Amino acid sequence: MKENLALIGSSSAETMAVAKGIVQACEDVKGKDLVVLDVASISDVADFFIVVSGRSDRQVQGITNRVMEQLARTGVRPLSVEGYEDGQWVLIDCGEVVVHVFYEPVREIYDLESLWMRARRLEMVKAA
């Protein structure tokens, strides 16, 4: 039986479901160093930032493709997707959830987790 990821947080059920689906999609394709930041209390930009890395530009594109497939299955249409062609930093803006898919060395340069260090990191737990 496949385990599903659950997030511990306090956002709306719909937003939480979108975030959980994205997290699961990233896990499915072996995204690396997955972090979910709850930025709702410190920013009007979104409720969650999901940050994940790929080991190559092709893996970054693969992670992005999987996230886009997940969103399409649930009827969520991103407001914008930027950076896909280069595969260095892909930004998927879903409104309340913003996904950052980085090529590992590029993630280290921008260090979003430090920039948003006041954001609460959401715990990802395996749900049976």
Image (cartoon, rainbow, N blue to C red):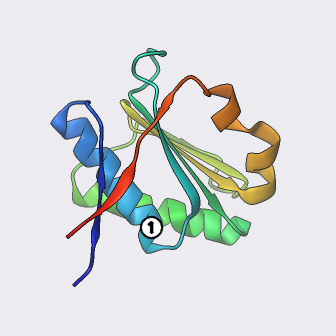
Q: Position of residue 128 (x, y in %)?
A: 19, 70
Give the number of callouts: 1
Q: Where is residue 99 in the image (x, y as percent from the top left)?
A: 50, 44
Quadrant of residue 95 within the rendered picture:
top left
Residue at 25% in and 31% down? 10
Q: Position of residue 78 (x, y in %)?
A: 39, 42
- Describe residue 123's horizontal placement relative to residue 100 as left or right: left
Up the image or down, 67 lies above or below 13; here it is below
Q: Is mark 1 on a helix, strand or loop?
A: helix
Is 6 in front, or is 30?
A: 6
- Describe residue 90's horizontal placement relative to residue 4 as left or right: right
Query: If the image is split into quadrants, where does the N terminus sit?
Result: bottom left
Q: Where is residue 70 in the image (x, y as percent from the top left)?
A: 32, 61
Residue at 30% in and 43% down? 8
* Residue with the mark numbered 1: 27
Quadrant of residue 61 within the rendered picture:
bottom right
Going by the numbered disc 1, the residue's amino acid type is Glu
